[in-house]
Image (cartoon, rainbow, N blue to C red):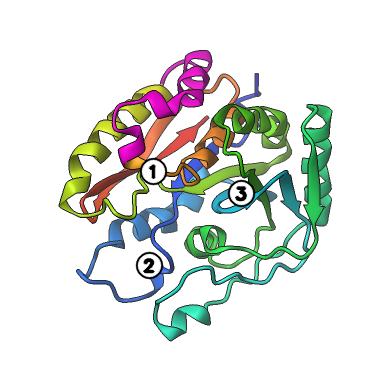
Amino acid sequence: MNDRRSALPTLYIPHGGGPCFFMDWNPPGTWDKMAAWLRGLGASIGEKPKAVVVISGHWERDEFTVASNARPPLIYDYSGFPPHTYELKYLAPGSPTLAHRVRELLGNAGITSRLDAERGFDHGVFIPFKLIYPNADVPIVQLSLRAALDPAAHIRVGEALSKLRNERVLIVGSGMSYHNMRGFGGAAQGPSDTFDTWLTGAVTGDAKTRNEELAQWQNAPAARQSHPREEHLIPLMVAAGAAGEDVGRKIFSDRVMGATVSAYQFG
C-alpha cells in the first residue's frame, strides 16, 4: 500500500480532439470547460511533481516501450487542422534517468520492455500538458501501450510502477473515456452516459473489485459503442494499477459533442 502522506495521486485525463484547445472550434466553446479544468489540474495536485510518466492512447508498440529522449520533439499526429496547430511548441524535457528507472521497475515485475531514444511527444501528451504545466518545466517520460491492448497487462504495468508515486513522480493516463469517432453527436448521449455510469462505479469501488471489473471492461453496458477500439481507455488501466489500495473518484465530467467525457483520480 502506498504511503498516502507522501504518495502522489495517479490520474486518467481526457486530452480532447487533436489540437482542440488551441484553435477556433464550431460550435465555439466546445472544449472550453475541459481546457479550463486542465489549466487548473496542476494546482489541484499541489506540489509540483519531480517528473511525469504519461501513457497516451496514441503510442502503441508490440512491447512496452519507454521514451528515453532527453529533448523530445513534438509529433503532430493529427491531420486536417489549421496550419498554426502544426507550429505549436512544448519544450518540456525528457528524463533518461527516469526512463531507465521505469524499465527497471517493469523488469523487476517480470515485464519486458525496451527503450526508444528517438521518440517525441505525441498530441496525447503535449496538448494537455501545455495546459497543465504551461511553463514546460516538469520532465515527462512517455510509456507506450502494448499493441495487444490487454487491460490486465496494463493494470500489472501500473502495479509495477506504483513505487514512483513515493518518488514524486506523477503517473498519468491520457485518453478519452468515450472515444467513438463515428458516434459523436446526438447518438453519443445514451451510450456514453451508460458507459460513464458503469465506469465511474468500477473506478470508485475497492481496489480488488475495481481491477477485476476494469480487466473485463468489454463486458460493460455500451462498452463497444463507447470504445470500438480501446486504445483511449487502456491508459486508465495503468493509472488504476498504480493506485494500489487507493480508491478512485471522478474529478471532471463534461458533455462534448453529445458525449459524456470524464476524468478520474486515485489517491
Q: Position of residue 151 (x, y in %)?
A: 55, 31
Spot the residue most to the bottom: 83
Q: Which residue is mark 2?
A: 20
Q: Position of residue 54 (x, y in %)?
A: 61, 49
- Point out the tag, 1 or 3, that comes first from the N-terminus: 3
- Note whether 62 is above or below 131 in the view shown: above
* Of 116 and 245, the residue lying toward us: 116
* Of 46 and 25, the residue lying toward us: 25
Q: Main secondary structure of the magenta part?
A: helix
Work out how far the residue at label 2 is from the one at label 1, CA to CA, in angstroms: 22 Å
Question: Any magenta on residue 204?
Answer: no
Q: Which residue is mark 1?
A: 228
Horizontal side of 210 relative to 219 (left or right) equals right
Q: Quadrant of residue 147?
A: top right
Horizontal side of 8 relative to 184 (left or right) equals right
- The three-letter amino acid code for the residue at tag 1 is Pro
Q: Is residue 9 visible?
A: no
Q: Position of residue 66 (x, y in %)?
A: 74, 50
Work out how far the residue at label 2 is from the one at label 3, CA to CA, in angstroms: 20 Å
Q: Residue at x 45, y 20 (%)?
A: 213
Horizontal side of 38 relative to 106 (left or right) equals left
Q: Which residues are magenta?
A: 205-225
Work out how far the residue at label 1 is from the one at label 3, CA to CA, in angstroms: 23 Å
Q: Which residue is mark 3?
A: 54
Q: Quadrant of residue 173?
A: top right
- Give the number of the disc on residue 62: none
Question: Any magenta on residue 215?
Answer: yes
